[in-house]
Image (spheres, helix red, strand yellow):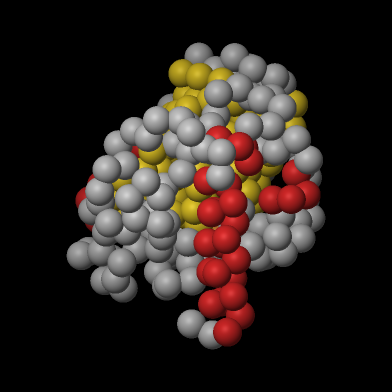
Amino acid sequence: MNARTRTTLFAALLLTGALLLGATLAQRGMGGAPGTGYGGAGGFGMMGGGYGGAGMMGQGYDASARTLDFDAARAMIQSSSRGATIDPTTNTVRYSGTTVTLDVIAVQPGKPDTTFEIAGLVDPTVEIPRGATVTLNLVNMDYGADMPHGLVITRFPPPYPYVAMPMMGGGPSAGIPPLVARNEQDLQTATYAAGSTQFHATTPGVYYYLCQVPGHAQEGMYGKLIVE
Ligand SMILES: [Cu+2]
């Protein structure tokens, strides 16, 4: 970890702490499991204050965290294609129906650094039908103490500055706070932090999903999300 990455991590911790202020929602499924999030007991925050913006997509502020083993993380890579129409040419993943499960991998092994993978595509455009209830799952498969990754959905378009969050005006509509990197280099024996949240895609339009860890969205860790 060099000085810059240490600074990045520290900034991420500060950011996460700030987001926890005012978070009062009951926590769900977060009781223990060291290493699944920041701050230990009670530390894996709800989206409360900082995320309670305009509610453009409604009810996206609750999140829960858990730890997956390699098989479970791999199963999530596989399930990320389920129910989706995948177009590698346009780098688009389209979902249909009223219930959508959106499985997102942060830095899937074998893919580029500082990216999201959905259905095998890197930072794809995601299309979701209007009115769908979306379960958003994120697993961080990256390695390195300086490699937490989270995900927020916002109207705010790229390019993103080093610290993207304050630029978002009314705030993100949904998201998952940063998840720690996997705990060891060996993929088979490592454990992986995962988080989930639900939101309703109530308002059509163009949104963006991005990693809120400082520097990551600036480096390109984002994609477009269209509610049709
Ligand atoms: Cu990130």
Pinpoint residue 23: horizontal percent, then vertical percent.
Answer: 52, 37
Left or right: residue 87 versus residue 105 is right
Q: Is residue 65 visible?
A: yes
Question: In this orientation, which residue lies closer to the viewer: 166 or 75?
Answer: 166
Question: In this orientation, which residue lies closer to the viewer: 212 or 41?
Answer: 41
Question: In this orientation, which residue lies closer to the viewer: 110 or 7?
Answer: 7
Question: Residue at 42% of width from left, 72% of height from top?
Answer: 144
Pinpoint residue 77: horizontal percent, then vertical percent.
Answer: 37, 47
Question: Residue at 57% of width from left, 61% of height from top?
Answer: 14
Question: Residue at 70% of width from left, 38% of height from top?
Answer: 171
Question: Residue at 53% of width from left, 32% of height from top?
Answer: 61
Establish if 67 lies above or below 46.
below
Pinpoint residue 16: horizontal percent, then vertical percent.
Answer: 54, 53
Quadrant assignment, res 48: top right
Q: Is residue 117 visible?
A: no
**In the rendered view of the protein, which quadrant contains the C terminus?**
top right
Establish if 75 lies above or below 191.
above
Left or right: residue 170 versus residue 119 is right
